[in-house]
Amino acid sequence: MVVAQLCIRAQSCGVTRPFRRVMTTATGSGTAPKARWWMPGATAVVTGANKGIGFDIARRLAEEGFAVKLTARTDTAGSDAVARLTKAVPQLAAPPAYYLLDQRDPASVEALGAALECDCPAGVDLLICNAGLAFPEGTLGAGEALESIAVNYTGTALVCERLMPLMLASAAASSGAKPRIVTVCSGAGKLDILSSEATRRRFDESKTRAEVDALMAEFVQSIRDGTHEELFCNDLYGMSKLGMAVYTRVLARELGEHALVTAVCPGYCATDLTVVRDGQIATDGYQSSAVGADTPVWAALLPAETATGQFFSERTPQPF
């Protein structure tokens, strides 16, 4: 992906709108900074937002005045989430809407982009990539690795790149406030999970998505060969989230001053991704999804002068 090419595509879409910054104090939720970079009705897209952390992110953004576009994998889940969001936030700046998205399917990502181009002529100001997949602990197979990577890493990259023209043509872009991308990563997917120093160095020095793609493909092959513990690790979720985090840093470098790109860890939350083997959501010692939504929303609302390409946990910078 080349920023110049994305800028050309954004300009050709003719997506523009007037913009003004709104200066206000933080709301009762304690989320927003004193200087708001967004205007009421600014568009926020949140993937995987029909439940759990994603829904709480969508709710918090709606409370801050965003027009929320959430994604779900089924019409039932999406329409239910919109109804709950409407009930939870009585004074909405704009009605929420849902879109179908299965990040494993490039055609689904393309359909999302086409729909948003039609429905959001003023562009997309904020994208929070929350959709994710986790197999039960201990699962380790090449097929499961491919699916984990397809959702958590590749799907996230496809969504970011498909929506980027809409973001580069948004009100935030035209005002200098910068469009925002927040990827919901994990503390379980950081460089220190890798057993090989050479592999760790390759991830750390990756400058392009192609380099990250190659490393993820090598991880899958290492499972087939039985060398994954020596060269990578034995955690499918952690590896897919590591790819996501490293890609976030790659994207931040590529976009430079054109956008504010941030990776966050929401913490260990009681959601469908933390189910125990009997199918029940484990809650002992886990924080709520509402708490998990705090850092992603806080990162999304940071001022424009914030350095891009950072990783945050509990509102605190962390190493990748």
Image: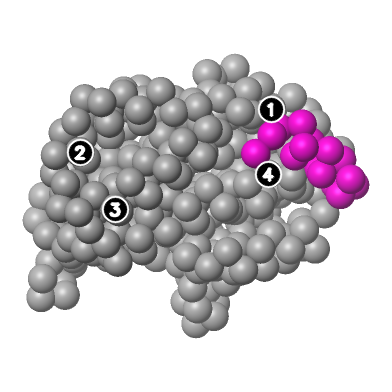
Residue at the bottom extreme, as displayed: 76
Q: Quadrant of residue 95?
A: bottom right
Picture residue at 37% right of the left edge, 49% below the top:
217
Which residue, given by chain and number where applicable, does mark 4 sit on? 164
- In the image shown, does 57 or 86 lie closer to the viewer? 57
Instruction: Work out how far the residue at label 4 is from the one at label 3, CA to CA, in angstroms.
Output: 31 Å
Picture residue at 82% right of the left edge, 44% below the top:
9
Q: Is residue 12 magenta?
A: yes
Nearest to viewer (mark 2 / mark 4):
2
Q: Earlier in the sequence, mark 4 or mark 1?
A: 4
Nearest to viewer (mark 2 / mark 1):
2
Which residue, given by chain and number where applicable, does mark 3 sit on? 221
Quadrant location of the C terminus in the rendered image: top left
Q: Is residue 225 above or below residue 11?
A: below
**Label 4 crowd (10 A; few <14 / some 14-19 / many >=20):** many
Which residue, given by chain and number where applicable, does mark 1 sit on? 258
Q: Secondary structure at mark 2?
A: helix
Q: Earlier in the sequence, mark 2 or mark 4?
A: 4
Picture residue at 18% right of the left edge, 46% below the top:
228
Picture residue at 57% right of the left edge, 52% below the top:
158
The type of residue carrying mark 1 is His
Q: Are marks 2 and 3 in contact (CB under 8 Å)?
A: no
The type of residue carrying mark 3 is Gln
Q: Which residues are magenta?
A: 1-15
Q: Secondary structure at mark 4?
A: helix
The type of residue carrying mark 2 is Leu
The type of residue carrying mark 4 is Met
Q: Earlier in the sequence, mark 3 or mark 1?
A: 3
**Label 3 crowd (10 A; few <14 / some 14-19 / many >=20):** some
Instruction: Work out how far the residue at label 3 is from the one at label 1, CA to CA, in angstroms.
Output: 36 Å
